[in-house]
Amino acid sequence: MGEGASRAARSRLVPARGNADARRLLARRDREGDGPIPRSLFALSNGNAGPASEALAGICRSRRRERDALSEHNDQSMNEHSLSTSRLVLEPLRESHADGIYESFVDERIWTYFPKLRPTDPQALRARFLRWSLGPPADTPEALAWENWVGFLQESHEAVGTFQATIMRDGRAHLAYSVFPRHWRRGYASEAMSAIVDHLFQNHDIDRVVSEMDPRNEASIALAKRLGLSLVASQTVDEPQTRTQGTLLRFERNRNVRGSERVSSRKGVDVSRVRDTL
């Protein structure tokens, strides 16, 4: 997908120097769990960083230039797929979506398993959505494309949640979603993610979809099974937020498996033991 173009775009950027405001902003975003801004994207090639607001503008311009450079090597943008289902319209996510869904997006019930990733204010959500809309992070070369959607009801155009697929260069696509609490238990997550999985297998060169989740997240486990994913691994991972260790379940579905079908677990994974802990 134009590795040369990506390197060329990044080569036009240099680290910011002597900008205390920008450094404080970067540290704040890192602390709040909104993901670090790649240092190479923090200033333009003149090496002179202005106030924090100018630095942010520079980030946005730099990421847009990198995306444009990559797009020159694609016949079709990988971030512009609108999808629809019987009840929903999935619009490619944009920064402007943040204003209309902020209150729903920051509902604490959504962030039960990762509270430090909850946006702190509308500006933080706009910044997050801007990054999501510009494709995979420059410091994640293993990611080929990053598709994000906001789901709306067809009749009322009320937002029901956000949905994400990270397409990797090794043929995997990682799934993620967030349905707003007022729309829970109405089948919207299943409807949207089913359409996304079909879209991924039809329009991207992937061989499997993957979803990882906390074993306490019973709703996501049930959704994964409805989508035809099966548990293939249980691993102990470090939880930076609590400085403890926890369990992460990994579900997968191969290309040739339909939704609601079961995939046999990989050899060596004691699926029954893991299920007993749910």
Image (cartoon, rainbow, N blue to C red):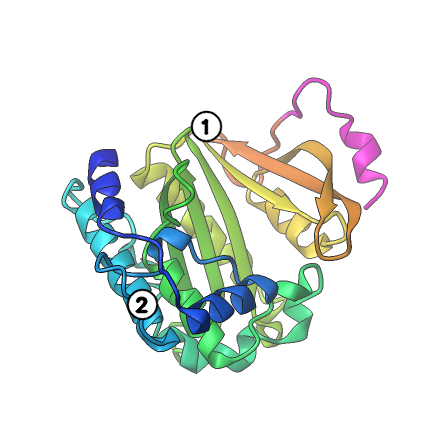
Report the residue at 40% width, 43% height from top.
198
Mark 2 and mark 1 in contact? Answer it, CB < 8 Å.
no
Quick check: is 11 in the magenta stretch? Answer: no
Q: Secondary structure at mark 1?
A: loop
Q: For label 1, count other residues whose C-alpha is less than 10 Å away and answer few (under 14), some (14-19) or many (20+).
A: few
Principal secondary structure, stretch drawn in magenta: loop
Give the x, y percent position of residue 161.
50, 68
Which labelled disc corresponds to residue 49? 2
Q: Is residue 148 above or below residue 230?
A: below
The magenta segment is 264-278
Report the residue at 52% width, 40% height from top.
259
Q: Nearer the viewer, mark 2 or mark 1?
A: 2
What amino acid does circle 2 point to? Ala
Which labelled disc corresponds to residue 31? none
Q: Is residue 1 left or right of residue 239?
A: left
Q: Is residue 36 left or right of residue 110?
A: left
Give the x, y percent position of residue 94.
33, 68
